Image (spheres, helix red, strand yellow):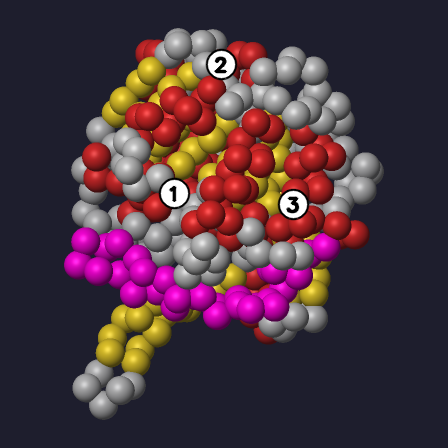
């Protein structure tokens, strides 16, 4: 099972703004970790969301949607705080701009006391972290404690693992309109990258973190800190990846009829994790030694998933039967 950690919220899409000041909005469920958990479930992978969800009407709908999608509910922590709302306005290229309304909201209200128990963690093979939950206390403190407890190591170069050898993945998914101090994000990356096995990051996030350094240089530097694989997505220019064992692959983006790019990175991440599970590479040592041709196939699989999402309104990840087979797939058990 995958345990996905982080926020769940509602995206309000600005559909029409009239001269009289009235607006037409389209409300869609969102939040990068929420999208990822849903995306994995649609790809036939057992997944649960560890996050704070409000007991308000929006929180009830979020919980019901998770149940309908087959996402494991045991990690959810219901909170009396309100649900976060994100106002989304996409430009002519479909690229979204977000405004978040969520100070003291439920998804920012987790504490270390909310961490899953040993019994709840039974069966969890992989843990994913990312997005603004990493830097908004007290949730950030809870996730830091979880990473320290479950990774069981200080350096990615150490072979040993505590707590059953769980696999850790990261997608930073920076939100500067939630935490505008880039140094906070840089410190968080320096803190957790040595504990990660897999990192997926957009070139946009890398430009925000290190505007004077190329994506290739940052990916190589991050790889040296310990992950077995670093994947960089480049929007319309595709993606590339570097593995610790020396493999490199680069692929173009899918050609699609674009509606918007909301959730595209989350669908890419879901396909990446599901693809690794399918091919028996949800394992640090095996992932590090992935051949370049298999890595390229995996990236194409992820790009297909991302492209399908871009052709739909909002975060609407694909199901497994919409994606191609992987040449080294194994039966669908995470």
Crowding at mark 1 (Cα within 10 Å: few <14, some 14-19, many 20+): some
Give the numbered dot on residue 288.
Answer: 2
Kindly report which numbered mark, 1 or 2, lies closer to the viewer in this rendering.
1
Region of the chain picked out in magenta, as a range: 83-111
In the image, residue 212 lies in the stretch drawn in magenta? no
Question: In the rendered structure, are the residues bearing label 1 and label 2 in contact, judged by CB atoms less than 8 Å apart?
Answer: no
Crowding at mark 2 (Cα within 10 Å: few <14, some 14-19, many 20+): many
Residue hosting label 1: 209
Query: Could you tell me which secondary element the residue under label 1 belongs to?
Result: helix
Kindly report which numbered mark, 3 or 1, lies closer to the viewer in this rendering.
1
Q: Earlier in the sequence, mark 3 or mark 2?
A: 3
Question: Above or below — where is 145 with respect to 20?
Answer: above
Query: 30 or 219, which lies in front?
Result: 219
Crowding at mark 3 (Cα within 10 Å: few <14, some 14-19, many 20+): many
Alpha carbons under labels 3 and 1: distance apart = 21 Å
Residue hosting label 3: 143
Residue under the point 60% across and 45% down:
5
Across and down, in percent, residue 273 comes to 49, 30
Query: Could you tell me which secondary element the residue under label 2 belongs to?
Result: helix
Across and down, in percent, residue 100 comes to 45, 66
Q: Earlier in the sequence, mark 3 or mark 1?
A: 3
């Amino acid at each position: 099972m995958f345990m996905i950690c982080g926020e769940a919220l509602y995206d309000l899409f600005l559909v029409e703004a009239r001269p009289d000041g009235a607006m037409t909005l389209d409300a869609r469920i969102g939040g990068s970790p929420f999208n990822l958990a849903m995306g994995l479930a649609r790809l036939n992978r057992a997944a649960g969301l560890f996050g704070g969800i409000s007991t308000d009407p929006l929180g009830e709908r979020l919980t019901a949607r998770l149940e309908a999608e087959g996402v494991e509910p045991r990690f959810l922590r219901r909170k009396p705080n309100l649900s976060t709302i994100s106002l989304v306005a996409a430009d002519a290229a479909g690229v979204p701009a977000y405004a978040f309304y969520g100070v003291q909201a439920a998804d920012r209200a987790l504490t270390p006391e909310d961490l899953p128990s040993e019994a709840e963690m039974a069966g969890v093979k992989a843990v994913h972290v990312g997005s603004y939950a990493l830097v908004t206390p007290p949730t950030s403190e809870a996730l830091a404690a979880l990473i320290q407890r479950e990774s069981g190591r200080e350096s990615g170069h150490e072979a040993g693992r505590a707590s059953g050898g769980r696999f850790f993945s990261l997608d930073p998914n920076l939100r500067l309109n939630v935490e505008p101090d880039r140094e906070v994000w840089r410190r968080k990356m320096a803190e957790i990258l040595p504990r990660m096995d897999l990192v997926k990051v957009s070139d946009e996030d890398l430009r925000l973190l290190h505007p004077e350094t190329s994506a290739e240089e940052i990916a190589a530097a991050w790889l040296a800190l310990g992950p077995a694989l670093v994947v960089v997505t480049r929007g319309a220019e595709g993606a590339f990846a570097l593995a610790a064992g020396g493999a490199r692959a680069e692929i173009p983006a899918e050609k699609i009829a674009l509606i918007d790019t909301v959730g595209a990175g989350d669908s890419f991440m879901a396909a990446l994790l599901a693809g690794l599970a399918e091919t028996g590479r949800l394992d640090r040592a095996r992932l590090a030694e992935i051949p370049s041709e298999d890595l390229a196939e995996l990236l194409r699989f992820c790009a297909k998933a991302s492209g399908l999402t871009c052709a739909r309104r909002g975060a609407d990840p694909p199901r497994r039967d919409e994606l191609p087979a992987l040449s080294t797939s194994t039966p669908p058990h995470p």
